[in-house]
Image (spheres, grey):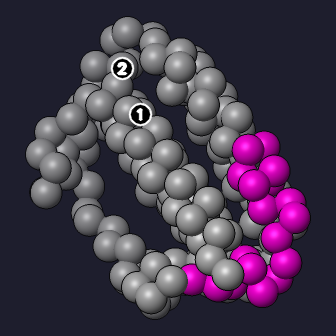
Amino acid sequence: MMQGELRAMAELPAELASLVSQASEEQLDQAADGEWSARVILAHLRDEEALVFRLRLERMLSEDKPVFAPYPPDRWLAERDTSRDGLRQLLQDFALQRKASVTLMKLLDEEALQRRGIHPQRGEFTVSDWIRYWHGHDEEHRWQIKRALEIR
């Protein structure tokens, strides 16, 4: 399996906690025009972990070529629940969800990694492809958080 990606994914909650540990509430909520704040990115990662990424993985493992509906970020932003957006809660929730995802991924054998899903815009992909995409999504948002916290 993709050990490098899996290791990075497992380490991300601690890395994010470290990145935001010295940030003020104001810094967590600042954003450049057209960008999300660090707090919103953390909420996005938490929500996507449980509601999109792991759910799609579970469906690929239990269904034959499930078809996934798009989940546009702008819709998520407009409809999201902000009641658990305190920094400590965001970090704890994400760490818990990520642990569940990584635990599941560690159980996958070569046959499971070749199972497939279908996305209307991305086409057909394997579990391996999905995990690589998931890791890329993490990396993109990790850098966005760093940039968001650099705004003065």
Q: Is residue 81 above or below residue 2?
A: below
The amino acid pointed to by label 1 is Ile
The magenta stretch spans residue 69: no
Q: Are marks 1 and 2 in contact (CB under 8 Å)?
A: yes
Q: Is residue 151 above or below residue 138?
A: below
| Residue 126 drawn at (x, y percent) | 26, 29
Q: Is residue 135 left or right of residue 122?
A: right
Q: Which residue is mark 1?
A: 131
Q: Residue at x 51, y 83 (%)?
A: 32
The magenta stretch spans residue 15: yes
Query: Which of the 4 quarters of the picture holds residue 22?
Result: bottom right
Q: Main secondary structure of the magenta part?
A: helix
Q: Residues within 10 Å of mark 2 (few under 14, many from 20)?
A: some
Picture mark count: 2
Query: Which of the 4 quarters of the picture holds residue 8?
Result: top right
In this orientation, which residue lies closer to the viewer: 58 or 40?
40
Q: Is residue 47 left or right of residue 55?
A: right
* Residue 113 tag number: 2
Q: Is residue 96 left or right of residue 35?
A: right
| Residue 70 drawn at (x, y percent) | 26, 65
